Image: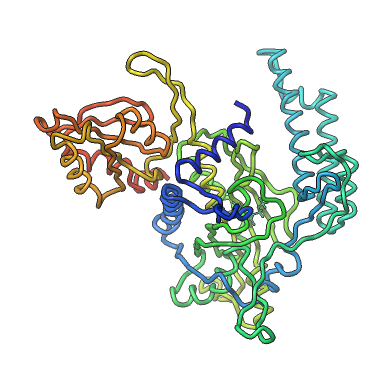
Amino acid sequence: MQQEDLFKKLTSHCKEYGFIFQSSEIYDGLSAVYDYGQYGAELKNNIRKYWWDSMLLLNDNIVGLDSAIFMHPEVWKASGHVDAFNDPLIDNKDSKKRYRADILIEEFIEKLSEKKTKEVTRAAKRFGEEFDEAMFIQTNKRVLDLDERINSVRRRFVEASEKSDLAEIRQIIIDCDIADPVSGSRNWTDVRQFNLMFDTKLGSISEDASKIYLRPETAQGIFVNFMNVQKSGRMKLPFGIAQVGKAFRNEIVARQFIFRMREFEQMEMQFFVRPGEEKQWYEYWKEKRMKWHSNLGFSQDKYRFHDHDKLAHYANAATDIEFAFPFGFKEVEGIHSRTDYDLSQHQKFCGKKLQYFDNELSKSYVPYVVETSIGLDRMFLTVVAASWEEEKIKKENGAEDERVVLRLPPALAPVKLAIFPLVKKDGLAEISQKIRDDLRFDFICQYEEKDSIGRRYRRQDAIGTPFCITIDHQTKEDEKVTIRYRDTMLQERLPVGKLREIIGEKVNMKSLLKSL
Ligand code: ATP
């Protein structure tokens, strides 16, 4: 299937089955803002819990925080967001479409890299077992030319970005012959900087009201509370503060569903360390965070690290964990070693000491910070994209059939167990409801009595329910039900009294956390 088709199918699946709706849809929607429906809200809660518990339960030295969205406007001056939280935008004069100039260039570089990979794969096929990949890469003319182009575009781009040289960024687009992906036109405007922060007014009388911002990241709420948490919690370095919350960015281009939204949720953790120890903690968190992703059991080759070519001036190391979305490998999470930049800036702007007294070293200093920052919505898209499958199956009578199944890790699934009476009559509905009433305190169960059992299975497959049970006439005799497993579609008879234990264990968050 074409990757574009796959993406379309994923987005319409999310809507059809109550995971995600366009915001204010009855008024034709609000661009790049989305609402989570009945199953989406559950799945999102479960992903949030997986992150939160992995931080808070599994680490003695990480605590939580829930800071406000509105903050003092000076915060954003100190953090650099007022002056520098910009994206370079460019318009195409023919299509009237707007793009991020940096993304156009990055995608161009990515295409060259893909060409290089194709050359290598083709050669590997041609030469068979004798193929020496390293030698081929070092000597093949086409590969060397591609490498040279990739490096030279990258060098120019990094240099231009560091100097905020917008004319040069435009020139790179022209020199690389980059066309509008929609219309194919190369008729570009100049590049302009665009600040991504939303602002509003605090106070009721407009003359007195002061301009404040909707936070573009949750991290600053952590930095400004560093002393509060450290002192009140008597925290010793190294320690971390974790927070989940909404962030807002007036994104220039927002065409990829919940990948890039104007209102979204972040899960961030700032880990405060002794200066000089940050690189070691950076490596530690890189590994930990990749483990958190791979622990979900999706194919490992869907993930990769992408180290930043261009480091922010305050960072001394940065990498992205990228996921293979249907539209290519893209960032899901960033891991950044941010030195003492943020705390030092706040110290300067607020005029108060933001320092830690290290008993062992008998001195005070501004701690260094390693942060892990992941978008909850982007993670949601990752989970849905990795779980979604259109599968050919055989019916019991041998006929061909198809099903769409969300192979969600059971601990993340919105509904854990579906309970079906084979028929409504003969007391089967009552027995089913009794089972549901008994299990509802343990996990989310859904009772369904409409349509054939096969159809009921399909609906549950589509929302990722890992277990369905059917109550039939035999149940009255032997107190057993038929359990059907989502992934294998196998069925077996189980005593009603065992359901809590067998299902509870598999759907519990503990099952995921234990393998971390
Ligand atoms: P990008 O390069 O994709 O714009 P970024 O580097 O600006 O992302 P960060 O500032 O590092 O992103 O934010 C941390 C995380 O927050 C990202 O890894 C991503 O998962 C999430 N995120 C950032 N912007 C958005 C957005 N507009 N919509 C949804 N999630 C976002």
Relative to 447, 334 lies left or right: right
Relative to 352, 296 lies left or right: left
Locate residue 299, reporting x and y percent.
Answer: 51, 33
Asked if residue 260 is positioned above or below residue 315 in the image, the reply reads above
Asked if residue 327 is positioned above or below residue 266 in the image, the reply reads above
Locate residue 457, reporting x and y percent.
Answer: 34, 31
Q: How is the image coloured?
A: rainbow
> Furthest-left residue in view?
477
User: Image quadrant for the C terminus?
Assistant: top left
Relative to 104, 382 lies left or right: left
Locate residue 184, reporting x and y percent.
Answer: 82, 37
Locate residue 210, reporting x and y percent.
Answer: 66, 81
Residue 265 picture quarter = bottom right
Residue drawn at point x = 60 percent, y = 83 percent: 204
Residue drawn at point x = 59 percent, y = 40 percent: 323
User: Image quadrant for the N terminus?
Assistant: top right
Residue 243 visible in the current orientation: yes
Relative to 71, 514 lies left or right: left
Residue 374 visible in the current orientation: no
Asked if residue 179 is positioned above or below residue 202 in the image, the reply reads above
Q: Nearer the viewer, residue 2 or 183?
A: 183
Q: Nearer the viewer, residue 137 or 80?
A: 80
Q: Nearer the viewer, residue 474 or 285?
A: 474
Residue drawn at point x = 45 percent, y = 41 percent: 17
